[in-house]
Image (spheres, helix red, strand yellow):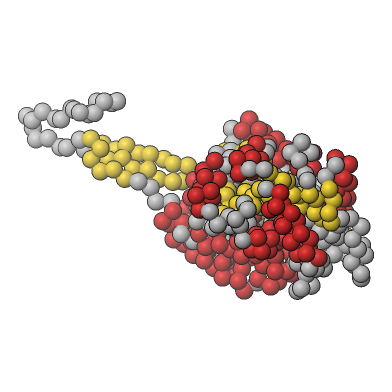
Amino acid sequence: MRDIPHFIGGRAVAGASGRFGDVFDPNTGRAQARVPLANAAELDAAVENARVAQKAWAAVNPQRRARVMFEFKRLLEVHMDELAALLSSEHGKVVADSRGDIQRGLEVIEFACGIPHLMKGDFTSGAGPGIDVFSSREPLGVVAGITPFNFPAMIPMWMFGPAIAAGNAFILKPSERDPSVPLRLAELMIEAGLPPGVLNVVHGDKVAVDAILDHPAVKAVSFVGSSDIARAVYARAAAGGKRCQAMGGAKNHGVVLPDADFDQAVADIVGAAYGSAGERCMALPVVVAVGEDTADILRSKLVTAIEGLRIGVSTDPDAHYGPVVSAAHKARIEGYIQMGVDEGAELVVDGRGFTLQGSEGGFFVGPTLFDRVTPAMQTYQDEIFGPVLQIVRAQSFAEAVSLPTRHAYGNGVAIFTRDGDAAREFAAEVEVGMVGINVPIPVPVAYHSFGGWKRSGFGDLNQYGMDGVRFYTRQKIVTQRWPKRVADGEVADQSFVIPTMR
Ligand code: NAD
């Protein structure tokens, strides 16, 4: 079986810890490669490479750093098909979704191409007699990113794009479940002209993550993954004095008001709930129908739409979604479906026991629909992260606003309505970080920022956009005074007295 290497100092390095994880093809259920799980010594070696490389990289002027990003973007386009096929073969999402995964990362790289402008500081001339004040943004040094399995191209690029453009060196610890695309991205960065050591990929599990969190030379850690781990990572990084942003899980609601365009809403909700087998942090696994009539109409249209879904291998161009990532995850999702039944929710469509002819070993789960789900149910409170959609019936607009507001997660939310006033009130009141109005997956564009509230995000700066630039830089503010030269016999202007200024 193929062994996947680390990528340290600009070259492939075999794992030395003796520990490995299996990388599966979710379409067949068979292991296809082994990924090494790094120990602290291997992480140290990567950080040392990064530390040395960073000094020279930070001294490269920002316009030249931007040129590397421009070239990387071009290479992503050239290699799009190859990357998408590789991504689908380890993740299981259909190729069209893999292309979207790469494209959304590419857009953050495009944003990072503007780094000369984005890092410019402020200047105040004449803040006092002979006094100017100016600020500059400087890279932090060595920074790290720890990423989840579900977007193995986009999320690494959310992180290393702005970080490297800003002059940092980067340690990427991708998900051990689909590590090949992150590795390939690092190779393409070198091909684009990045000096060796500026971007290193170290594979691993908790051992590697803890080594990153405890390493004194790592100045900032960006994490995306499930909430309990996000919270633990945030706490450990902060205890070590590091800057940290840690994005967690989600349970996004789609609220449908009685005046919505139901056909449009159902098409959007089905795509958002079942696309990528529900393995998106911005999936819509909960529909809140306002009023019994709305719920009844939605339910019947959802059942019809679900009947039209095609589940297939990730290379099937007509498939709406493919397998989930692992056998354990499939079992977990099916366990939640049983829990929903036991809790008293009405199981309208049961996706358990789904097998695909010719791919019987694949990790497939059929689309599942529950009705009459209530906030007290565990299956409502937890993130299931599979193709399971739950209808919650609300009796009023106020109740519909309060459901996502009271939920422990606060990543994304959507409302479907033709009433601008109601939509505006909803957006203002709801306690969730990203809101869509007739937009089912409100992932902000690359020049805004991405981040959830409550259990969905720990730390105060979001991913990408200006927040990304702020996260990977620190400001220096210089107050300079050049007193006016005075002729012999004249009295110098002594009027500048800190902290008051006349
Ligand atoms: P995960 O939490 O299992 O893993 C995320 C990363 O943490 C991986 O690199 C993994 O190797 C590492 N890790 C695993 N166990 C660890 C431990 N005990 N200590 C330290 N590190 C550990 O998440 P996943 O299953 O890969 O991804 C799915 C989750 O990510 C879902 O909860 C999803 O909602 C969330 N997610 C959130 C966002 C967001 O932006 N909010 C985006 C994508 C995914």
Residue 343 position, x and y percent, is 85, 40
Question: At 67% from the left edge and 67% from the top edge, which residue is drawn?
Answer: 99
| Residue 385 visible in image | no
| Quarter of the view holding residue 431 | top right
In depth, the one of 400 and 384 nearer the eye is: 400
Question: At 79% from the left edge and 72% from the top edge, which residue is drawn?
Answer: 316
Q: Which quadrant would the C terminus be assigned to in this image?
A: top left
Residue 90 position, x and y percent, is 79, 61
372, above or below 84, in the image: above
Question: At 62% from the left edge and 51% from the top edge, which residue is drawn?
Answer: 257
Q: Which quadrant would the N terminus be assigned to in this image?
A: bottom right
Query: As drawn, is 263 to the left or to the right of 500?
Result: right
| Residue 348 visible in image | yes
| Quarter of the view holding residue 116 | bottom left
400, above or below 110, in the image: above
In depth, the one of 464 and 403 nearer the eye is: 403
Question: At 83% from the left edge and 54% from the top edge, which residue is drawn?
Answer: 348
